[in-house]
Image: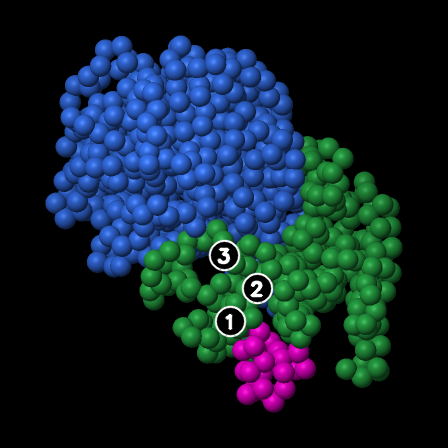
Amino acid sequence: MSEQEKNNSVLDKRSSRRTFIKNSGLTVGGVVLGGALGSLLIKDDKSTTTSETQNHATTPTANPNVALMFFTPNQYQVTQAAVERIFPEDANGPGAKELNAAIYIDHQLAGPWGSNVKDYRLGAFYKAEENQGPQTKILRKDLFLAGLESLNTYSNQQFEADFKELEATQQDEVLLAFSEGKVELYGKVSSSQFFSLLRTLTLEGVYADPMYGGNKEMLGWSMRKYPGSRMQYVAEIQDEKFIQLEPQSLNSHMGH
Amino acid sequence: MVTKLPKVPVVVVGMGWAGGIVSAELTKAGINVVGLERGKDRTTADYTMGHDELRYQHRQELMQDLSKETITYRNTVSGKALPMRHYGTFIVGDGVGGAGSHWNGQTYRFLPYDFEIRTKTIERYGIEKIPAWMEGLNDWGLTYNEMEPYYDTFEKMAGISGETVELWGKRTNPYPTPPLVKTPLMKEFEKAATSLGYKPFVIPAANLSESYTNPDGISRGACQYCAYCENFGCEYGAKGDPAVTVIPVAKQTGKLELRTHSNVLELTKSGGKANGVIYVDMLTGEKFEQPADVVVVASYVFNNARLLLNSGIGTPYDPKTGKGTIGKNYCYQVTAGGSQLFFEDREFNLYGGAGALGIEIGEYMGDNFDHAKVDFIHGAGIRSTQYGDRPIAVNRVPAGTPNWGAEFKEKSIKYANSNFPVKTQGASLPHKENYLDLDPEFKDEFGYPLLRMTYEYTDNDRALGKYMSTITRKIAEEIGADIIDTNEEQGPFNVNKDSNTHNTGGVIMGSDPEKSALNTYLQMWEAENVFVVGASAFPHNSCFNPTGTLGALSYRAAEGIQKYLKEGGILVKA
């Protein structure tokens, strides 16, 4: 990306985030208007700064959670590019890349879930009927890496460049082919199985509690006016008007 | 090596609603009970960080660890069953409280029609209304009026919040607490349904509408509508859960010895009775034999059938001959026929909710409408619910929207607070080839065969779903929305696709030992000191959430066990 393009993209982000705030403001219920919007505005400035520093990979970031326990830097970047196409930045607000979904994915694949520790893994693995669920032995972490490699191989076959270098529309074409199971991935593993894992992990990385590494500054929740983890909605649930509440994470329960 | 322990009067396998109720009732009567639970103990303190959607719903924190045991699945008798390697269509609870900890709290009674379904169907429509493949459809062996006192006891113990509903059987008492609140979307449903001539009611709930002290002296606070019920435990104890009701009561008697991490592998037997159980400590691997006068099998539907089959107790059901009973009449539920409403300019506070918060009509349940001109029997509840929409799980978008990318993001955010469903929950009736047996190939971590499920939706299910879709569409149109998507077809069953968690049957009750495994005290016809308690006893599944009926039957079983300890023998004449 040239310096010019980079600047443009930062400007785009700023303007789209302003649109987001403006749109939110139109629909906010009366009660918490000042507080919620105020904090969104502050977060707006902070997140722009953070995303700018992240573009320079050498600058250390303020969030110690943003570090890799599983991916290589290149695998991380391909993941960032892929999650951004699943859940792109738009007028609503940031995309999965800025929300740190790729960090979330890195941390999940490094942990027990990435190694399928609570899945049934005994006995032979037969070819399944569609309604019997996946019957492949490959672990989630290995499936994901195979998928990333295959994204690059396929991108080079189709467009003569690695996945992360492609135009957004080209990346969408590649992902569509993967989602439809059209790409040979690894052994008997279907590319649609990888795509389904990628999609699931992206949405989790956008919307899971920020303690897991994604959903940066709860902006995933803010976009859809989801208040996160609060203890009661007795009044709100009976109200005819929509009441927007500032999100709270599980961290707010640490005093209990 | 197996360590043999001293004999006890009663051993209970599983500490959910069934095991918890039986343990509370027996210990209150002064009987010593050993309770074996394969998972851990639990209190409300376990749920301090309970509002964690990822951990509880998507990583199944409260569910059985499938690496140790799962089921295998095939859709026809000729297919090869393969293991359900991770959760998809249903979930299986683990630990003290079992499914009673992670449930939503919708607490219904079944209809008088359900208990006498065969007789009443033949009376009104003739024998030809029951197709040959549904030959297993039978009366339950007792009537609604006989069940009523047990329902009443369960509802008082759990503090069910609700309103008296027409079209159901008679009630001795009103619900112990008033119904939950009506939210704006529930009022939309109410207005539309009323103007169409129906009589909507608020769904009866184990999420307390107000603070309540039950007859055992257990006090609990009111529901806060925090929206974390299904898949989650309630940090307030506002949701009826064995871990905050019957199990503390049993513990308080000093007569319950609760052994957690104790996974029962098989029942031992001699001379037509069980001697006790063999179990393994899941933390140390040590094996024990626990002899008992009475064995109460009260684990989940699947494991109840599997334990009996792995122990050689009872005659396995054979779908070719229709003979045998263990594994017979596995039923599920029909969820086709729903309509989804989307609004351009209207937002609801969908982040709030409760597991049983909703409104429903009863006109299409059971035999409440004339089936002479339709090609199915039984029916469905039609309802709008507000469980609370959590953002990873719920991303409803209009039909035709891609499930990823720019349009998906835009629409899923646009409609996140601007949609709700008018949905159905339909009855599931037995098919002779829908059943449970032992898998010939796949084993659990201890080498015991897994349970094999053979199941597919039936013609009755498909016709029922299609019919109900016309009703949900009518109500949705009366409500009025910018987009209404109606699902008309019940697709094939998929073990990997979330649809419904209500599994029933496999060890069914009845009045004929040739056709049922249990009598109406849930005592086994073929082993008089074995009581098998749970939704496994349902001869078919009605159009309601099963827990109310499961709870009522648990109270009846507890009564039967006390009677058996005094008198011995089979408690009901065949």
At label 2, the amino acid type is Arg
- Residue at the image position 58 percent from the left and 61 percent from the top: A109
- Numbered disc 2: what chain? A
At label 3, the amino acid type is Asn
Q: Which mark is residue A179?
A: 1
Which chain is depicted green?
A
Q: Are marks 1 and 2 on the same chain?
A: yes
Q: Which-is-in-front pick, marks 2 and 3?
A: 3
How crowded pointer 3 is (Cα within 10 Å; few <14, some 14-19, many 20+) is rated as: some
At label 1, the amino acid type is Ser
Q: Magenta segment, which residues?
A: A147-173
| Mark found first going from the N terminus, 1 or 3 | 3
Element class at badge 1: helix
Residue B135: quadrant of the picture: top left
Principal secondary structure, stretch drawn in magenta: helix
Q: Is residue B161 above or below residue A139?
A: above
| Mark found first going from the N terminus, 1 or 2 | 1
Find residue A31 and report its horizontal and vertical position in percent: 81, 40
Find residue A152 and report its horizontal and vertical position in percent: 59, 80
Residue B348: quadrant of the picture: top right
